[in-house]
Image (cartoon, rainbow, N blue to C red):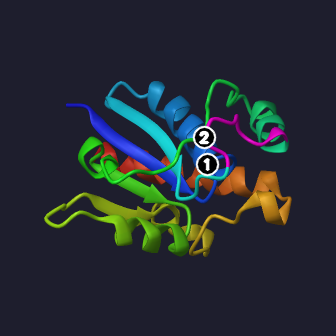
């Protein structure tokens, strides 16, 4: 059975496209997983744009290609399209929950739930921190934890 997962951040140009690419790459190598992944942003600031250049470069250095991805805004219909919505921080989670349709039971969580050893409660936004490698480290760790959870 195919699992459908949506990664969400603010602008969909750094964290969530990185999570989409990292998780897709890691899951692709696991025969126990059949997943469909996408990413979106809670804002409409970058709709149609590729991921942020420095994020693409940092990801490419680790073997992840973000170049084909384009930013899109989260929409209420995503609650029907995805079984799991993973937010990069509490602000994203609150915005997603604000849009939740009545009766929807789609699971919405913060990505760091899958990387408890990190000690962090959110994925830092490298657009502001400029620490793209820190973000990728956490995205990789959380992706591993998510894969572990999905394959149990």
Name the residue located 74 percent from the left edge and 37 percent from the top edge.
59
Q: Does the magenta stretch include residue 48?
A: yes
Work out whether 65 lies above or below 14.
Answer: above
> Are the residues flagged by discs 1 and 2 in contact, CB closer than 8 Å?
yes
In this rendering, position of residue 66 left or right of residue 33: right
- The residues colored magenta run 46-53
Q: In which quarter of the image is residue 72?
A: top right
Query: Pointer 2: what residue?
Result: 71
Residue annotated with mark 1: 12
Where's the N terminus, which quadrant? Answer: top left
Vertical arrangement, residue 61 with respect to residue 54, above or below? above
Residue 39: percent from the left, percent from the top? 50, 43
Give the quadrant of residue 35: top left
Give the percent coordinates (x, y) of residue 97. Answer: 36, 70
Q: What SS does tag 1 mark? A: loop
Q: Where is residue 53 in the image (x, y as percent from the top left)?
A: 83, 38
Instruction: Name above or below for residue 60 compared with residue 138.
Output: above
Residue at image x 82%, y 65%?
129
Q: Is residue 121 left or right of residue 66?
A: left
């Amino acid at each position: 059975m195919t699992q459908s997962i949506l990664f969400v951040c603010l602008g969909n140009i750094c964290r969530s496209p990185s999570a989409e690419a990292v998780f897709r790459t890691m899951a692709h190598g696991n025969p126990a997983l059949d997943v469909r992944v996408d990413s979106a942003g809670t804002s409409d600031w970058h709709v149609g744009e590729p991921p942020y250049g420095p994020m693409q470069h940092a990801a490419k250095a680790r073997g992840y290609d973000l170049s084909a991805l384009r930013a899109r805004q989260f929409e209420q219909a995503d609650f029907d399209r995805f079984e799991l919505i993973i937010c990069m921080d509490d602000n994203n989670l609150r915005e997603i929950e604000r849009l939740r349709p009545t009766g929807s039971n789609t699971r919405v969580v913060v990505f760091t739930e899958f990387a408890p050893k990190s000690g962090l409660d959110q994925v830092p936004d490298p657009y502001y921190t400029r620490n793209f490698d820190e973000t990728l480290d956490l995205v990789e760790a959380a992706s591993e934890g998510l894969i572990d959870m999905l394959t149990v």
